[in-house]
Image: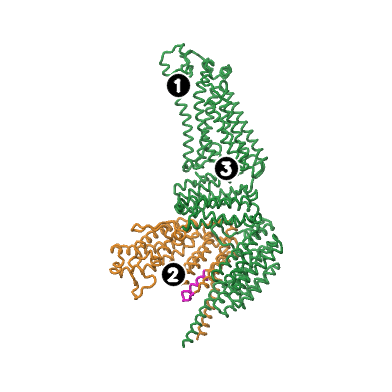
Amino acid sequence: MPNRIRLSLLVGAACFALAALASTAVASPSRTTATDAPNYAGVKTYLLARSKQLVIQLNGIQARSERYYALAKMERFSYPVLWRKHRAEVSSILLGLKPAFNRAHKAYEEEEGIIAGVPSLAQFDVIMDSGTSAADDPQTAVPFDLTLPNGKVLAKPGNFFHALLEPTVWGTDTRFVAPGGVKADLDRDGKVEFGEVLPDANVLVATARSFVSYARKSDAAARAWKPNASDVLTALVVMVPTVEGYFGEWKSSRAIAGSGTKEKAFVAHSRLVDVHGILFSLQNVYKGVRPLVARAGTAQSARIGTALQQLTRFVDEIYAQEKAGKEFTPKQADLLGGQAQQRANAIAGQISQVAGVLGIELQA
Amino acid sequence: MRELRRDGTRARRGALFALALALLAAALGAGPASSADGGAPWQQFDALDSALFDAELAAMTNDGAALALAGRRAATAADELAAGFDPSAGANAARLRGAAVAVASARSGVALAVDASTARAAALAGAYETVLAATRADDLDSARDWLLVREFKPVTRFAHPSAASSVAIASLADGVIPRARAVRSIRGDLLDTYEALLRSSLSDTGDALRAGFPEKAAGSAATARGYWWILRDAFAGQRGAPAAAQLDRAFERVVGAARTGKAAATAAAATTIEDDLLAFRAAPLSASEQARRAGQLIRYLGLVPVEYGRGVANGNVVVPIEIQEAIAFRDGAAVAFGELQSYLAARDLAATRSVQRALAGLDTRLGDAERGKAVADPEEVKSLAKTATSALDDVYPADWKAGSAEADFDVIATLLKKVSALAVAGDLRRAESSRLEAYATFELGPEQRLRGLAPSLFQRVEGLFWYGADGHDGLAQLLRQNASADELAATMAALDLALKESAEAIGSGPQSRAAVVTNSAIIVFREGLEAVLILAALMASMVGAQRRLRKPLMAGVGIALVASVVTWVVAQTVLGSLAGWGEKLEAVVSLIAIGVLLLILNWFYHRVYWQENLQDLHRKKKRVLAGASIGFLSAQALGLVMLGFSSVYREGFETVLFLQALTLEAGAWTVLQGVFLGFAGVVGVFALVVSLERRLPHKKMLIATGLLITGVLVVLVGHTVQTMQVVGWMPVTPVEGLSLPFWAGMWFGVFPTWEGLLLQAAALVFVIGSYVASEALKRHKRRRILAAPITPAAVTAGSAAELPGEMGELRFDQLLPRERNGLGRAGDRDDDRSAVGAGGRA
């Protein structure tokens, strides 16, 4: 029986390999000719769609947060009373926040390759997704302070997604958990599981309000952005090699390091989802700029396009295995991360060559 | 039953992982790389890489079948890849084939990591040799294909991977560069890359062992050894074959130690290699690149204590961002030091170590301050930076100390990037501070040379830093207005372009000897013009009784010339420190010049002409110089000395600095020829003005002198305002939409800022107003006098000076209408030079 399973899976794998082979051949970038014009408008359209989506999702999060805050305020911020009197509504709000977070984050990750990679937009990545708190690392800290409705100020608290919203919603940062020690079985399954907490309403609503405000600013900046070869190639060179950092975070997240990890973020979903989002957005960026790259050499263009596809598929397959239940050891995660990084460096290097040959300046 | 279930679970897990491997193989190896003919070199390399990776993954899960499969794929790919190598890469082809074949039979994860890394590195080494061989053979298609099989330095905050190799091949194909140069560029680029990667692989080896990843450690050690194969020839060329053979053995020891997981032995062997490589640089930097890095190192080190000092007060970090900037500059210094390390170590190992320690010390202290662990005293940071700069000063050869404009441009670019980032983040105060730092770097370095080599460019750069140029607003203006990111980006792009052109102008040096002579002459002529116009106008009018006033004026000029020569001599040795004071000193001396000029104008015209000259004419020398008789140290004389000095030295100091910079570019003799030419022009203008004025009737001469000095005053005010704006002593408010040509600023001191234009207008209004007021007063008094009864006795005996008010400035013959006073034409002879001359001489 086990042998049969193994055999059937191997056959399946072989079929997949053939399919992958076929899809690679179909998607071969060699069809691009040097006379095609780069499609910057396409890149921008892609960006604006995600940017708008992010604002929409965050509006939803803010609406839930405002309602939660109103209820808490009504009960004078006595969370045991809040839980006792409004259990159903609070549960509904908080349970709905998690998928809303994931949708918002997905929208962002799919634009992150551009936002973080284009120098004029990069500050929004620091604010929304990558900036640390001043306490952790002032060098990479966010530039804002968060003022709560009760007047308390969180000085340079870290980025909105992973240092504020995620730890607040999932309760991984005890500072953001509502006082009162309420054991909130939100899904009424009889167990208080990981992520079932009442957040501090002041932190939640302040985070949501400020986050929406910055997302709108980011959207406005994206609208004002005029894509050009330098911006787009810089985004690729800067962002592709960041996969190493993501794999590092994946390695230290609950998914690999287990519940004993000190990592407070990346609990909403696997960090590999984020890597996928970034690579997906970079593939779209590359699609727009590929005719330009082809001017430097069709072989180079093919090399870059193929490598980007392979890297994305590589990440997707690891995620597929993780989702299917495979538990990776830190050593395996390290090996996979090293391989991804090696390939990412090669892609960034090749794009640098293209920029050099075409005389396009890459920005720092 | 339980055993059966366990077997089943194990089988399912194995199957799952087999599936994983197949999927990964599909992901990584699918595509043209796996085609029957092997495809292009990069596809063959990808196929090899994927197979090696799969083998490592299989070894990690003890999946023998998958390992064997991956090993066979690796051997096939290696064979195809090696078959394409140039014959000169035979050794690496053998290593590649051998290691790839060994993969399938590796007995442990560590052994497999060594084999896989060896195969991969040998493939890269073979590709490196093949690229060079193909380029030498003019087979550029093949060179391009094989150049796709290479590694790159990782992207960092300070640098992107170099594109030198690809650019070299493209340039060779276009016939822009010769083949030998292309080969040199490619070799240099690749060696530089692999040298950096070798050092990081050695470092990774120790890190991996400490982290408990022996396979990774072994792989890193084998990778370092593979990179060594690429660098070996360059090393042997510089140090000799025995030294290279010694390193061969050291690398084998590292791999051997890492293979057995012996951390201490691995670390010891790695340290030996690092020491041996300390003074080695595979791709030697050109002389200008060395000077550039040397300049960067010194400049970045200099900025570290400045930023740190701003960020710390009373043992606390008060402005964290300043600490981060100090760290950024320290990191920049460390990068430059890394590039220069081998040269420095070859010159003086002890001093190099001292710099290394100082940089490490700075790293620790800045890091501690940033993390709030401990806040070092700013003096300590200053002392560490000083230790490093002093050690560098001892080691640097003279041409590195002369300063590198390229290094200045690098620092300016770094600071401007900071300006953009801070402005976009809304921190305008600090953006402005960085802008000033960037401008100061420009002003102290490239500007001096640029004035001699491309004067219009310097003004363009200056305009973009301040009040605008090329149709773009100035950076100072944009920051003050909190302008949009687009506007800022447009100015930044224009500034970037102007700086690039400036760097090129300086980099390519003087276009010709004639250009240097001409530029030197223009500098001397331009700088000397204002002074000479003031002096000539005044001297021309100092005739007769006023001739004596020439002495103190010329004494001031003489002192200024001597001071300028002394400045030249001093500047020979301390150009940098003098340049730091350049514009501030110019601003101060200019202010003195304006003040003295206004004083002298007022005194000279209102007192000397009206009171002395004309009274003298009428009173026949009776009291001619008695009241104003003037010892050399009188206030009047001192005023003239000061006027002579300030008029000349303010230009002399600046001229010395500009010419010093030009001397570095073109040599003293060439510059001196320009100086003589410019000086001749200045003397010519002087003689011309004096001669023309002397030919004019006296009254017209006075008017011409007044107009000339007024004009010079306006120009002087314009230049002084601009200088004060540049040193930050006066705000800058550009005139929207006004763009002035280069010559308007250079020759007339007219710059498109409200401060400059308004103050120039104010100076003009002041002089004209003063004249009009004086005339009005005269008319008023004339009316008063005409209204009073006139007696000849009163006229002849009375001294104008004794009359109340300003009567001393009035000429009697002007007081009466000719038809009424009956004095006729004789009274009009005051515009007759002979009469004045006679009066003066009598």
For the C terminus of chain B, the quadrant is top right
Front label number (3 vs 1): 3
Circles 3 and 1 on the same chain: yes
Which one is nearer the viewer's eye here, B557 or A279?
Answer: B557
Label 2 – label 1 distance at C-alpha: 92 Å
Label 3 – label 2 distance at C-alpha: 59 Å
Circles 2 and 1 on the same chain: no
| Residue B257 image position (x, y, % from top left) | 62, 71
Q: Check the rendered structure and report the hue given to chain A.
A: orange
Which one is nearer the viewer's eye here, B719 or B338?
Answer: B338
| Residue B805 image position (x, y, % from top left) | 43, 21
Report crowding for label 3: few under 14, some 14 to 19, many 20 or more residues within 10 A (C-alpha).
many
Q: Is residue A249 above or below residue B501?
A: below
Which region shows up in magenta? A312-327
Q: Is residue B1 above or below residue B399?
A: below
**Label 2 with label 1: CB-CB less than 8 Å:** no
Which one is nearer the viewer's eye here, B402 or A281?
Answer: B402
Is residue A113 visible in this depiction of the protein? yes
**Label 3 with label 1: CB-CB less than 8 Å:** no
User: In the image as oriented, which residue stretches furthest toward the bottom?
Assistant: B1
Give the green chain's letter: B
Mark drawn on residue A269:
2
User: Which chain letter matches label 1?
Assistant: B
Report crowding for label 2: few under 14, some 14 to 19, many 20 or more residues within 10 A (C-alpha).
some
Front label number (3 vs 2): 3
Residue at which label 1 appears? B806
| Residue A16 image position (x, y, % from top left) | 52, 76
Amino acid type shown at disc 1: Glu
**Label 3 with label 2: CB-CB less than 8 Å:** no
Mark drawn on residue B579:
3
Q: Is residue B653 above or below residue B330?
A: above
Magenta segment main secondary structure: helix
